[in-house]
Image (cartoon, rainbow, N blue to C red):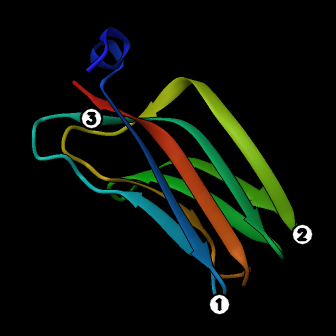
Amino acid sequence: MSNSQQAVGQLWQEDAVGTSAGVTATKTASSDNLKHYVTGVQCSGDGAATVIIKQGTTVIYTKRFAAAFVMSEDFRVPLVSAVNALVSCAISASTTNSEANMQGYTAK
């Protein structure tokens, strides 16, 4: 592992593609007393929808779209999960063709 990876933690990326009713990309919970840090998200959908990022069941980010959309957001200050909690990025079921991509790192 390089020095930069040791400083940041384990890098990860999760993505999901849906063709019927929304989609959810999920980074599963750690069991090593670690947190997930979400540093960016990219999403698209062919209709009105809501993009929701959660840590566990708690909403930590929401963005609504009134029509078809493409979005990309980098979080200079990462969104942080609780210890041993999963993080997910969901696009609501109101859009049929959708894609969610979320990246970040896992560390103490």
- Asked if disc 3 and disc 1 are in contact, CB closer than 8 Å, the reply is no
Secondary structure of the residue carrying tag 3 is strand
Mark 3 / mark 2, whichever is N-terminal: 3
Q: Position of residue 6 (x, y in %)?
A: 27, 16
Sort mark 1 into few (<14), some (14-19) or many (20+) by Cα contacts within 10 Å: few
Q: Residue at x 74, y 70 (%)?
A: 49
Picture quadrant where residue 3 is located: top left
Q: Residue at x 11, y 46 (%)?
A: 31
Q: Which residue is mark 2?
A: 67
Three-letter code for the amino acid on which mark 2 is drawn: Ala
Give the residue furthest to the front.
1
Q: Position of residue 89 (x, y in %)?
A: 52, 57
Say if 18 sits above or below 32 in the image: below
Q: Residue at x 61, y 45 (%)?
A: 41
Quadrant of the drawing holding the C terminus:
top left
Say if 76 sits above or below 23 in the image: above
Q: Which residue is mark 1?
A: 20
Say if 28 sits above or below 23 in the image: above
Secondary structure of the residue carrying tag 1 is loop
Give the residue furthest to the right.
67
Q: Is residue 11 left or right of residue 84?
A: right
Mark 3 / mark 1, whichever is N-terminal: 1
Mark 1 / mark 2, whichever is N-terminal: 1
Separation of marks 1 and 2 at Cα, in angstroms? 17 Å
Q: Is residue 83 left or right of residue 41?
A: left
Q: Position of residue 101 (x, y in %)?
A: 58, 54
Q: Is residue 104 left or right of residue 61?
A: left
Give the residue furthest to the bottom.
20
Q: Which residue is mark 3?
A: 35
